Image (cartoon, rainbow, N blue to C red):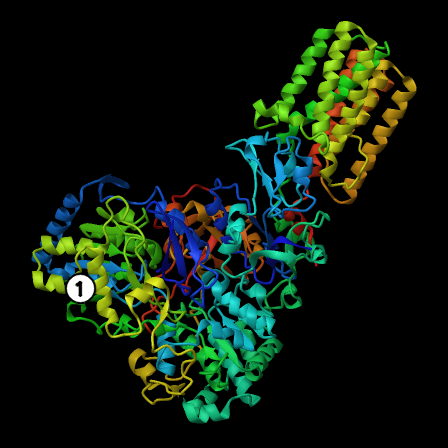
Amino acid sequence: MKKNAFIFNTNKCVGCMACVAGCSIENGTSLGVNWREVNCHNKIKHPSLPVFHFSLACNHCEEAPCMKNCPALAYTRDKETGAIIHHAEACIGCKYCTWACPYDAPKFNPASSIVEKCNFCVDRISDGKQPACAQACPVGALSFGQEEVNEENHLTPGFVNMGIKPSIQLIPLREEHAKPQIENTDAVEIDTEKLESYLPKSESKVTLDKEWTLVLFTLAVAALVSWQIAFLFGKAEMPLIPFAIISVLAIALTSLHIGKKFRMWRFILNLKGSWLSREIFSFSAFLGLTGLQIITENSIFGYGAMVFGIFSLISVDMVYKFLKRKDDLRLHSGMVSLTAILFLAWIGDYSILIELSLLAKACLYVWRKQSLRKQKLSYWPVVSILRLLALFVPFLSQMDLGIALAILFVGEIIDRSEFYYESDIITPKGKLRKYKL
Amino acid sequence: MKLISSACPRNCYSTCSIKVRVENNTVTGIEPHAENRATPEGPCIKGLAYVERANSKDRILYPQKRVADGKYKRITWDEALDTITEKLKNCKDQFGPHSVLYFASSGMSGLLNGVSTSFWKMFGGATTTYGNLCWPAGLEAARLTMGANKHNAPWDLEHAKLIVLWGKNPAETNIQEMMPIEKAQERGAQFVVIDPRRTPSTERANSLFQVKSGTDAALALGLAREIIKNDWIDHDFIAKNVLGFEQFKERVEVYTTEKVSEICRISEASIRDLAKQIGTIKPMTLIPGYGMQRYENGGQTTRCLLALSVITGNVGKQGACWHYANLQSYVFDDLKEPESYFPGCEHPSFRRKISVAKLGEDLLNIVDPEIKMIWVERGNPLAQNPDTNAIRKAFRKADFRVVVEQFMTDTAYEADIILPAKNMFEQSDIIGSYWNPYVQLKQKVLEPAGEVKPETEIYHLLAQRLGMDQTEVSQHIPEPTDEAIEKYLEGFLDKFPELSLAALKEGPQLANSFEEIPFADHKFPTASGKIELYSEQAKELWGIDPLPDYVPLPEQTDFPLQMISPNSKNRIHSQFGNLEVIKQFEPEAYLFVHPLDAEAKGIVNMELVELFNHQAKAEVKVQFDLGLRRGNVVLTNGHWAINGAAPNLFTEGRETDIGHGTAFHNTWVDIRRITIPITIGKEL
């Protein structure tokens, strides 16, 4: 089926940046917040690899993950043109779409505190014109038209292929462009390890210094839910005041993460599609019902709260499913569901559960570090030992439950922080970095 | 909203036709102009950046007077012009008109630039410059050999079966040329590049011959020897059209593949392979760049390269030409480049000239009279001419400096008075191109911003104040009205009935003299009427060998790294680099160095180092580049010294062997780690 699509010919693009400038001038974007980017492969000019570019903006995918996952329903599809439109007035600036999109199309603008992105120049194409970027290309490498998109070409090495039907006709490099033949009798072989050291460090889109609030928030969810369950089954006390304080702190932590705090209510608009909506909704319901449970001392509210609490734990873990793990593992010691089970076991003093969850966590943790080590990725053995000690010390020594929980919590902070540190988003740049002939 | 046809008047091959989008007397967009067959898809990033350039808050909109070092104050036009008039009168009365240096460069092309020359003539003359910073060695080499500088239309390139790109990087400097190259490749053409660097253009090539910089002539002669030895030459073409083939054949005898491989540092097999391609694949278009002739041996090098096109008969045919410079659109010039650059060819009042390549040195040394006042327009000599520190010293030695500028450039900062310059949207003018064949109108689309006055108007006002003869003024300087400007331009068009101002307002036009494939008639306007591989004139005019030859560059011992300063996509010489839209892609100058050269000095990627030679030192960030030949470093052209490292701090004032060009690439430097802080750009 034909649809509006960008047509990008890798043989013609020389990386001149006119498309980026054309877009930013036409759309009046802020400096440094470019909706289109030219991603260069082999910028350092490794002698046995070609240098080529992918000029990419939003691909207006048929299965657009930004739209599906936006908790605030800030994205719609324009029926006439197929353009995925981001609505500034609906965006809460949670940046979740910047994680969900593997093409790095949604851009967070710190000046406006919301996300923005390419809109296919919807007004221009509705008028029969080319999008500004395509018009600006001085060599005809980037164009636009009604295309029967050849999805096989999305398998081109170095191109992000997630099977979400991006509207881009990608014309791959011809054979003669793929392997440079360089004559130079003074050229010296440089070993791969040394070459790698010349490469600029890749910048992770998920970094601990940006996401520390999420570390604390997600652990707070685990702590509150496990506490509430233990309370429900009579294994612990849950006074209103401390509960309320922790709840408020948790909510404050999430709000730190979003750009438009007065639109926070929009978080729960996309229960149908977004795990983030589900997380926020179920956690809010959990807090409300737990409050009622404490005040009314009616266990019906407690059971309701528990259901929402468990669902919020699942949601939290599901929210992070886009993250690309450096260790490529699906199961994780840093998952909040596991953390909640560990906390519950301790607070409720279910000794079997303590042993099982401890064992599960420790095994998963060691497995993960081993896997990083195999890939020669950095990790800090001292931190890892601390993390494991925080798991075993409370178990092996007799101590007050409060102290035990505090030590456990520190361990969980380490684990969860490492989880963020070791995670990244799939991006065209990252993909091109990995591409080798 | 209006869309107005115009053209980009920068010193650039492409000379794109564009459509300017104007809303409320503001430029809001630059769009492609499909009627130009050479640039149908529109301009490069710099062309798009005109939106910012035209509306930039940094633009100079009012006359300025220097109040302290680097500090300027707005003054009225009356004050500015009165001061200038008084200085001009004083200089003329006390020291004679030649105590004034009139310096103009290639910042904006157009026929109206002739008004400036007319003014200085009426003033009684002035000291001016001869030569050119860019391409004269190659122009003169081609003129001596073929009699004229013209080549096939840019779109003819797609018919070539072999494209040899020699020292040019069109992907960055002539981006639309990549289109016919790609078309030719789609049709199965071979595309080879000879360049010490790996560039975005070389990425498209079948092979890259990464020769030692400055040795191109040796390679060309070695290739010629192979081609002759294997009898791949075009006997018929040579017999009918070439003078001096036998002597040339003898000349190349010593350039064995073994010797050439040693000189150029590429393998013998690769030389034989390239020779076979050039000898056997027809038609071939050879595209030499301007970079490889910016060496002291640039003219002879170009003659050697050109010989390859000649002996294989790749001249004057579809898909076959010597693709160096195409001056076909310069129909209004009585004297074409490069001859117009030579001293002695001009009006007697300009007989006193100094070398553009040795501007600093000559300015400092010239006496009787010394230079007392300097006038600069359309140029930024402190950034663009060799040996910045000498030029700065010479500028400061003069008593008074006027700079006509749009932005606070290195040169503007030397001025006593800055006059706000028009931009390309504020006055109509006719321009040609040295690549595409069109005559074009760069059209006025809006009224000048602030108090900007075009140079024609500035000179008009100065002429009044100086009390110049009214009749003479009215003959040579148009009144400051749009009608008078158009009438002035129409004066040039009278001789060309096919070129009307009305048609030029709609888009690019071809003059009747345009030939899609020049030299097809095998008529060569040389002394002998033949292609002169042997040129008596070369010897007479320039004292060089009448035959093409390889002249090695001087051996270097003091500074081990040869620095070349090629143009990049982000600037035309020193223009555009100050704009935000450009700066986001190149925020500062980088020195590109091969990692092994850097590591030998303990320097890591992106480290701030000291770059130095006998002339200057500056701090610059190193960027590793595995695509460079070891021993070469690259600092791209056009950086401003006020921002840090700029190539011309390090280049010597040196002319090329022929044509009065500038040997920018005869530059050797060294780098070291920074131990103690240094001051940027200061003399040693």
Is the residue B518 above or below the residue B585 in the image?
below
Residue at 55% of width from left, 82% of height from top? B282
Q: Which residue is mark 1?
A: B118
Q: Residue B303, position in %: x, y?
A: 42, 79
In which quadrant is the N terminus of chain A drawn? bottom right
Q: Residue furthest front?
A: A80
Please state which of residues B230 and B671 is positioned toward the viewer in this rendering. B230
B249 horizontally vs B22: left or right: right
Is the residue A227 above or below the residue B503 in the image?
above
Please state which of residues B162 and A75 is positioned toward the viewer in this rendering. A75
Q: Residue A234, position in %: x, y?
A: 86, 9
Q: Is residue A407 visible?
A: no
> The residue tagged with tag 1: helix, strand or loop?
helix
Q: Residue A288, position in %: x, y?
A: 72, 14
Residue at 69% of width from left, 23% of height from top? A217
Residue at 55% of width from left, 90% of height from top? B231
A131 horizontally vs B518: left or right: right
Looking at the rendered structure, the kind of residue marked 1 is Ser
B534 horizontally vs A100: left or right: left
Is the residue B365 above or below the residue A393 in the image?
below
Is the residue B117 above or below the residue A100 in the image?
below
Q: Is residue B36 visible?
A: yes
**Mark 1 crowdedness (10 Å alpha carbons): few <14, some 14-19, many ≥20:** some
Q: Residue B139, position in %: x, y?
A: 36, 74
